[in-house]
């Protein structure tokens, strides 16, 4: 049954395609930019002896990150389906894998909605109130998202020219500002002076392997979905 579905994949409904490879590349880059890279990676470097963390991180990137990254891209491009339907195309027994990805992403959304937007308290004696500044911010954010995906990848491909490059402009500004602060030289020396002894701790290797998933946005389904809009060959 799986082989039959794989052989018939070319007969599935025609999917739209990216206008050019730059749009696809910027989309993948923008998808990877987040707190996992902007905040968590520098935090781990500072925690685990500066540059020493780059050693297990680089090893994990070569043997874990790059193979999984190419696997997700290949699956999406070959089967030309989203992150949920692609697993059903491989095998009906794998159908829950795509559902699990979506369920995992919904948990922090629910927490943020109840705790931050609704401001629900932990006791029944005290009611929470809507945080209107948060409601308006969410409405503006969702409005921007709607405009970006209004026409599918036709509009998304145009939006990524701004959304994928703007974060790097902000990061460049932060970098320049950070280099002008007192103690910047000391911080750079600590970052690039590795403490090799800390590599004996298993936790360092575990966090490095975990960080790869944040750095490349593996396991979230986005890379599979983006690649499904590429030509099959």
Image: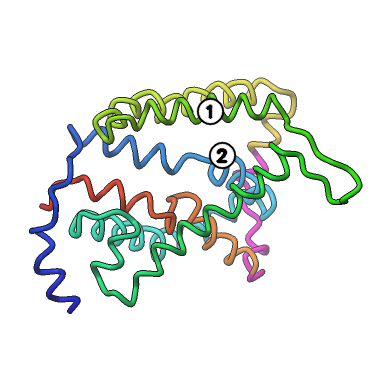
Q: Name the mark on residue 171.
A: 1
Q: Residue at x 42, y 56 (%)?
A: 218
- The residue tagged 2 is 38
Q: Are marks 1 and 2 in contact (CB under 8 Å)?
A: yes
User: Where residue 153 sits: x, y (%)?
Assistant: 26, 35
Q: Residue at x 63, y 51 (%)?
A: 44
Residue 48 found in image quarter: bottom right
Q: Earlier in the sequence, mark 1 or mark 2?
A: 2
Badge 2 density bin: few <14, some 14–19, many ≥20, Cα 10 Å: few
Q: Horizontally, is 135 left or right of 22 in the view?
A: right
Residue 157 found in image quarter: top left
Q: Is residue 96 above or below residue 105?
A: below
| Magenta-tinted stretch | 189-202
Give the secondary structure at mark 1. Answer: helix
User: Where residue 134 sits: x, y (%)?
Assistant: 66, 29
Tell me the distance, in whole angstroms, between the alpha carbons under discs 1 and 2: 8 Å
Give the secondary structure at mark 2. Answer: helix
Q: Horizontally, is 194 left or right of 141 in the view?
A: right
Q: Residue at x 52, y 40 (%)?
A: 34
Inspect the magenta stretch and tell me whether residue 5 lies in it: no
Magenta span: helix, strand or loop, mainly? helix
Q: Is residue 99 above or below residue 123?
A: below
């Amino acid at each position: 049954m799986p082989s039959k579905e794989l052989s018939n994949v070319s007969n599935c409904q025609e999917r739209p395609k990216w206008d050019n490879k730059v749009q696809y590349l910027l989309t993948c880059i923008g998808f990877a930019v987040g707190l996992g890279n902007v905040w968590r990676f520098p935090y781990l470097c500072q925690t685990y002896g500066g540059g020493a963390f780059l050693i297990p991180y680089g090893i994990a990137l070569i043997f874990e990150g790059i193979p999984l990254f190419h696997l997700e891209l290949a699956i999406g491009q070959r089967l030309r389906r989203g992150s949920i339907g692609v697993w059903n195309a491989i095998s009906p027994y794998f159908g829950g894998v795509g559902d699990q990805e979506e369920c995992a992403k919904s948990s922090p959304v629910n927490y943020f909605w109840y705790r931050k937007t609704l401001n629900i308290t932990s006791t029944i004696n005290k009611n929470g109130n809507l945080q209107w500044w948060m409601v308006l911010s969410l409405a503006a954010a969702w409005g921007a998202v709607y405009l970006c995906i209004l026409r599918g990848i036709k509009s998304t491909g145009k939006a990524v020219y701004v959304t994928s490059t703007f974060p790097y402009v902000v990061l460049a500004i932060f970098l320049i500002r950070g280099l002008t602060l007192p103690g910047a030289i000391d911080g750079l020396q600590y970052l690039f002076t590795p403490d090799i002894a800390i590599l004996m701790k298993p936790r360092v290797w575990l966090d490095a392997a975990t960080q790869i998933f944040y750095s490349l946005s593996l396991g979230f389904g986005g890379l599979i979905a983006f690649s499904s809009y590429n030509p099959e060959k």
